[in-house]
Amino acid sequence: MVRNEEKEYKDLFSSLEPEQPSMRFTKNVMDAIDGVEVAKPSKKYVSNSVIRILFAIPIISVAFICIYIFRNSIPANNYIPGIKNIALLSAGALLANLFLIFILIDELAHRKRRMQFLSDLNRSGL
Amino acid sequence: MHGQQHDNDIVQSVLDGNKSAYSILVDRYRDYVFTIINRLVPQREEAEDIGQEVFVKAYLSLAGFKGISKFSTWLYSIAHTTAISHLRKKLPRTVFAEDEDLASYLDRKIAGNVAENKNTTRNAVNEAIKQLAPADAEIITLFYLAEQTIEEIAVIINMEQGAIKVRLHRARQRLRAIIEQSYGAEAKFLYKN
């Protein structure tokens, strides 16, 4: 039933032809691009190595802080020379790094989905 | 496309400095680009100016075309965006405070006059399309005339595939209603194949 309807529409639209612009259309376009050059692609895409480094920094930081916290006993008075309130500092750094990790993971997942979709599109689009 | 140079080869040739090769692409796609724009902007002169702008824009950003999608899909998405930008500039700003407003404007707006020539199927379908809302006419044109897939139309119009399917179905229903309303009993000849 649906297939018949689809065929019906295909037959109906097979008679359709595109509208035509004026005869000077192509010449106007070629005149307009005369003297201008193709713009160089903007380097808006970040290279993979930069993304890896950006990923590595917070992960290493979190790992370092965790190791530091668990391997070294925090003094009972919660004081290390030069650093006031080590617990607050560690928790803050941990949260900030976790936040960064989530953002980066989201960005990477989004890029992957987009690339997958475009490559699927390319395959299906002949 | 038999016997024709592949779009991507022509693009590469243009990027290698053979500027005149770009005219092959313009000749190949000008009618389709013009028709898609004309569905959204019914005035021929304006549609033609926008069409030329589309090809100039495409030329300037040709290096950005990576061949991930078809060249036609890439070009039609520039055509769609340029036509929508033109409509946004032309109409009062308050009308387009939200994207929804633009969509509903395109849905509401009825373009073209009632068909006078009812003699041929081609004229009948063409005139019926002109009476569709511009957004519906654009989707019909992209799917049946420019032979873009649902996935490609989703990229061109920047909408979800599901929404495109619904819109296409709705556009076909409306088109059928217009044809039946305009041609009455004569409409049967349109569906006899």
Image (cartoon, coloured by chain):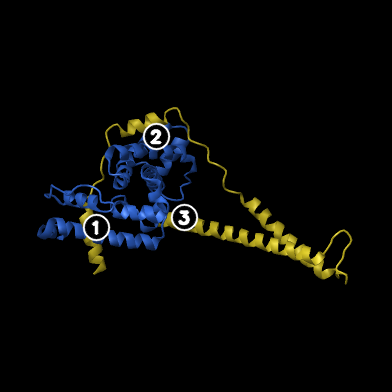
Chain colours: A yellow, B blue
Tell me, for residue A10, which label it has, or none: 1
Within-10-Å neighbours for mark 1: few <14, some 14–19, many 20+: few
For the question of whether residue A91 can be seen, the reply is yes
Q: Chain of mark 3?
A: A
Which mark sits nearer the N-terminus, 3 or 1? 1
Relative image position of residue B191 (x, y in whole percent)? 16, 60
For the question of whether residue B190 can be seen, the reply is no
Residue that numbered label 3 is attached to: A118
Residue drawn at x 66%, y 55% is A52
Which amino acid is tagged 3? Leu
Residue drawn at x 24%, y 57% is A10
The answer as to whether the residues below labels 2 and 1 share one chain is no
Marks 2/1: CA distance? 33 Å
State the image quarter where residue B183 is shown. Answer: bottom left
Frontmost residue, A124 versus A72: A72
B64 left or right of B92 in image:
right
Residue that numbered label 2 is attached to: B21
Relative image position of residue B62 (x, y in whole percent)? 46, 40
Label 2 close to label 1 by CB (< 8 Å): no
